[in-house]
Image (spheres, helix red, strand yellow):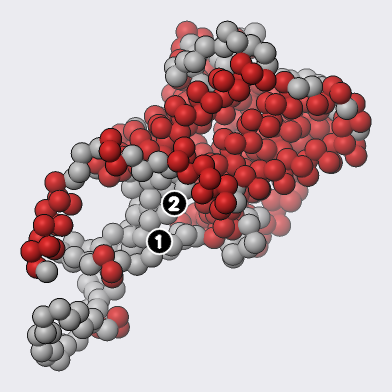
Amino acid sequence: MTNSVQPHGRHRAPLPPVQPHVPEPAAGMPAPRVPRSSAPRVPRSPTAYATSPTAYATPPAPAGHETRAADKPAKQRDAFFDNAKYLAIVLVAMGHAWEPLTDHSRSAEALYMTVYTFHMPAFILISGYFSRSFDMRPDRLKRLVTGVAVPYVIFEVAYTFFKRWGDDDPTQPISLLDPWYLTWFLIALFVWRLTTPLWKIVRRPVPLALAIAVLAVISPDIGDDLDLQRVLQFLPFFVLGLFIKPEHFQLVRRREVRILSVPVFACAVVLAYWAAPRMTSVWFYRRDSAQELGVPWWVGIVMTLALFGCSVLLTACFFAWVPRRKMWFTVLGAGTLYGYLLHGFLAKGSRFWGWFDANPWLREPTGEVLVTVIAAAVVTLLCTPPVQRLFRFAMEPKMEWAFRRDAAAIARERSSSARR
């Protein structure tokens, strides 16, 4: 949602006009509604968004106003953010498809490095933006468990069994402390969301998060548990998303920013083409410390700060070209987490079964284009509503049996039953 923040304090909302007396309705008849134009407008809170990875929520009712279930507005989605999520997940799938081509093609390596500079930062920044309303309220904690923690457990186990079968590795252990392949994002999102209340009370949250990332990259003893290197090194993008305002997205969508983003992207590709034989793309994964990559600790600091700046710049350029109107793929933005986790089976399977080694022509220009198109088509299919319905049991389980019922909700139901 891109509504700007409304001012508070100096200007008081005008009182509504006096309403004519309405007789008490007869028993069993609904009360007449007050016309919309007669009620004072209440500014929307910029932080009133859903905490689920795939949903947006409408703003809460103002204090002292109780809304009946029948009167609650339908959940609304902002086309811009759904478009951005879909395009970002397509770039993720294309990047995974290009990975086997990078050893034989400098051009593929340059595109790979360019896309990896901003595709996950953009996705993480959006996740932070829609986590701004997260607190320790029971319903939000429940969504965090069912929408992030449970899918992490399910897909970590599923990926492990897939690796045992596809890679002929029966000794592959099931370890929830060592995320394999794509599941790192779920555990990272779980940790980031839990720390959201802390970032709201500290001063200079983005510089602090960046300092933590710098400390992580020069700390080889962090280890692999919960993929903490990635959790900490990608943290600044999540924190940045927490404090971005709707007007910032309006700013990057200005015409002059769009025009300027074209040469910026062109320069990024040229720079990546120059850097391809001179540096390793492992830096973009943010899963290792500087010492583990065989460079001095100060190089890790320089690379972390440089990559953060480049990532923010290219992410802004990416947002500049995201359509703001409803497109044919807008509806797929609600299923990006499905596409993200499910396409990993095909991405890894192509390596396990040697598709690229068995078909050398895939490393030729025509083959590279075909691989790119197939990756985009597959992840698009995996984001569609039928696939969402099929896998909702794993991605968004209700799990009512696992949670205590909220006492306030029970009291409301009793009160409602008594009035009937």
- Nearest the camera: 412 or 182? 412
At 44% across and 27% down in the image, what residue appears?
153
At 47% across and 15% down in the image, what residue appears?
175
Q: Are marks 1 and 2 in contact (CB under 8 Å)?
A: yes
Circle 1 packing at 10 Å, graded few (<14), some (14-19), many (20+), is few
Q: Quadrant of the C terminus?
A: bottom left
The Cα atoms of the two marked residues, 1 and 2, are separated by 8 Å
Amino acid type assigned to the residue bearing label 1 in the image = Lys
Please identify the residue farthest to the bottom as the structure is shown.
20
Q: Quadrant of the N terminus?
A: bottom left
Q: Position of residue 279 (x, y in %)?
A: 73, 20
Q: Position of residue 292 (x, y in %)?
A: 59, 9
The answer to whether one can see residue 334 in this image is yes
Q: Is residue 145 left or right of residue 119?
A: left
Compared with 373, 56 (above or below) is: below
Residue 330, picture quadrant: bottom right
Compared with 337, 292 (above or below) is: above
Q: Where residue 55 is drawn, which disc sits there?
A: 2
SS for dot 2? loop
Compared with 1, 212 (above or below) is: above
Residue 353, picture quadrant: top right
Task: Residue under label 1, please give it.
Answer: 75
Q: Where residue 4 is drawn, which disc sits there?
A: none
Q: Position of residue 251 (x, y in %)?
A: 54, 57
Circle 2 packing at 10 Å, graded few (<14), some (14-19), many (20+), is some
The answer to whether one can see residue 204 in this image is no
Amino acid type assigned to the residue bearing label 2 in the image = Ala
- Nearest the camera: 187 or 153? 153
Q: Is residue 11 left or right of residue 290?
A: left
